[in-house]
Image (cartoon, coloured by chain):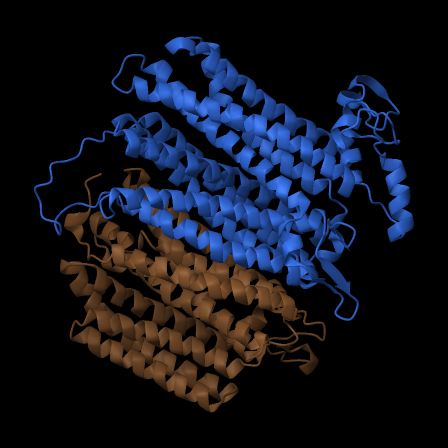
Amino acid sequence: MELTTIWFLLVAVLFTGYFILEGFDFGVGMLLPVLGRDDRQRRVLINTIGPVWDGNEVWLITAGGAMFAAFPEWYATLFSGFYLPLLLILLALIARGVAFEYRHKRPEASWKRRWDHAIFWGSAIPALLWGVAFANIFRGVPLDADHEYVGGLIDLLHPYALLGGLTTLGLFLTHGAVFLALKTTGDIRHRAGTLAVRLGLGTAVVAVAFLTWTLTIRSNPAAVVLAAGAALALIGALAAARVRREGWAFTGTALAIALAVATLFTALFPNVMPSTLDPAGTLTATNAASTPYTLKIMTWVAVIFTPIVLAYQGWTYWVFRKRIGVQNIPQH
Amino acid sequence: MDALDVARWQFGVTTVYHFLFVPLTIGLSVLVAILQTRWHRTGDEKYLKLTKFYGKLFLINFAMGVVTGIVQEFQFGMNWSDYSRFVGDIFGAPLAIEALVAFFLESTFIGLWIFGWDRLPKRLHLASIWAAAIGTNLSAYFILAANSFMQNPVGYRFNPDTGRAELTDFVAVLTNKVALITFPHTLAGAFLVAGSLVTTVGLWHLMRHRTSPDTDAYRYATRFGAWVVLISSTLVLLTGDIQGKIMTQVQPMKMAAAEGLYTTESPASFSVLTIGSLDGSREVFALKIPYLLSYLGTGDPNGTVHGINDLQAQYASQYGPGSYTPIIPVTYWSFRFMIGFGLAAAAIALLILWTQRKGRTPTNRWLLRAGLIMPALPLLANSFGWIFTEMGRQPWIVFGEMLTRDGVSRSVSLTEVLTSFTAFTLIYAVLAVIEFKLLIRYARAGVPDVTPTPDDTDDAERPLAFAY
């Protein structure tokens, strides 16, 4: 396999990992005002992701870094082109990260309420905008022959892109609800499970519409299979959530997210960012790539360190595998 | 004002701001790990109290370092896309490795440490803070290797076909002599900040609670922090000296700009302070130490140090017409502030240790006041150091290869970059106030009670040892 293909795959895998892991973080954040009826309940929700959210966010930093190292043109065009949406994502991630850490640092209800807003919006904005961004990457944007983005903000708000945003929003909400059902006890667990099914049904409709639209833009047999797999996984997850098989439900939503992202990347390949103007402006895994020498070094680094990272991150989830409930929240 | 100026201001503001938190994370992670190791070894409760106390301050600061760091990762692509295209083949690799090798280690194990007090065996819990500390310190290496490429590009060739710089020797990039010396200099600067914070907070409590059960803990913290400050300031000086010599070789203009040295001199004297215009045309007062600049720059008291005018003429003939001179007052004064603030912190630490000799407790109010401003001093020194080294690189974004003005994103409008600059500045300002107040609040609260609560509930009912 060509090195550029390997790195296309690796970038796809990193973003997939990011969406699966931070996807449920975002979901938990958005469900904070819905499932957390009082302060103790809200603390239960936040503490389900407390030990892991930071490590999950590093998937994004690594995906960005890998994109920079392996496909500098892609990194440069994407982030300068999607300037304002990315700015919003960054501001949201800043507010949200600090909110987790600071929310419980003062006793006043007003203090906590403010950070709860930060957590909610800091989760909802990226959950929506990542979908908008990836739908745009897939559909293509106005790039000139120098691969410079020449559109405006409005070009990124195409109905297809907005549907993509609703899809990630819905998927992350469902994924988060399923995660909470898996990680909590008592009343919260019950309500999260019920909510997961309801959210999931709405999400399934949106996601199927989005994936169908996706396959009409560009497609190949593998992408069709993956899209069908994503839909099936989501439906399976809902069925499992309905009968309170939370482990299976979580596997299902994680798989649905992975397969949906895989659908986009598979149908996109070998392009990484098509131009809607000049075909010469289209960025591909070849013309956006670094030199074979750089890719070879990075491949070795990835081969050695990725399994190590997966091992210790997996172990973290094992350490914090226990469900928590309001009885586990300390008084102070 | 155009998009380029605003993009530069934004990079400056967000980077200096990010680096207010990073040094504390780098230094304090290790100091907390040392305190916990002492507890592990001795079983003395005082160390556990200090671990938890400084650990809390560490975490308040840590969050800010993390979230402001995400901006740094994406800012190259957002605002400096032509730079990213030009150097991506070289510059992206250390950034990606930093994330994969260092940030994962840091973030995952910090989570294990925060929440793992009752979930992990003691030894593994101790190992977690060390793993996080190693990850943090390692991350500094990769980002400094990337930055050093901008100061002294090595291990690459310019490819005229692709119009970009391409990697030819990755080991050369990682062993860039600028990186090898900047790394210890930056780490020592970070420990200077962390040591100062430990000292200040310890001293404040020590002078308030002369006879409390925790006096001994605060006394230990004050001395521990002060020693860290003294050792790290010595290392800052030693590494800074070597750095100056390397800088004179690879970026002679930066050395000349640090000194406001307009004409080549051999031997060259070091200007401690100049009042008047820096080009010597209107010198009101100047304090100079003969031979010192020659020694600092070349290691030889009679060595030649090139002046700004000669270097400007040389670069103009080498790279074409244009100005190759940084803004001299900025480099001249930031260089002096860096050294001055760093030395001031070391002096206060020395004073604090002296007043505590043979187990005495310091009583002087002025000492306490000096002690309270102490953490600000190395923070300022670090900030001015970075302002010096980055402003001294101008007008280059990659020395000798690409001008800063050619690296900016062409597709980002003035309105967009003004929006982001305003948004980042506002949110950063608000968060700075919040963070500072929280640090004060938790520093005032003092060491926690660590008496274990009777464990009569079963595991499913037991409260978490730590919860957000």
- Residue at 59%, 68% in the rendered image: A296
Q: Position of residue A327 (x, y in %)?
A: 14, 49
Q: Does residue B146 appear anywhere in the picture?
A: yes
* Depth order, front residue of B309/A298: A298
Say if A111 sits above or below A151 in the image.
Answer: above
Residue A54, x across and y down, in percent: 39, 53
Comparing B409 with A88, the one in front is B409
Q: Nearer the viewer, residue B54 or A192?
A: B54
- State left or right for residue B170 relative to residue A235: right
Residue at the bottom extreme, as displayed: A221
Q: Is residue A122 above or below residue B20?
A: below
Chain identifier matching the blue colour in the rendered picture = B
Left-right relation of A159 to B262: left
In this orientation, which residue lies closer to the viewer: A300 or A81?
A300
- Residue under the image location 75 percent in, 53 percent down: B405
Give the side of residue A31 with respect to residue A41, left or right: right
Instruction: Judge whether B51 appears above or below A283 on screen.
Output: above
Instruction: Identify the residue at horizontal 44%, vertical 78% (top origin).
Output: A262
Q: Is residue B412 visible?
A: no
Percent across and percent down for residue B84 are 66, 60
Q: How many marks?
A: 0
Residue A277 in which image quadrant: bottom right
Q: Position of residue B249 (x, y in %)?
A: 77, 40
Chain that is coloured brown in the picture: A
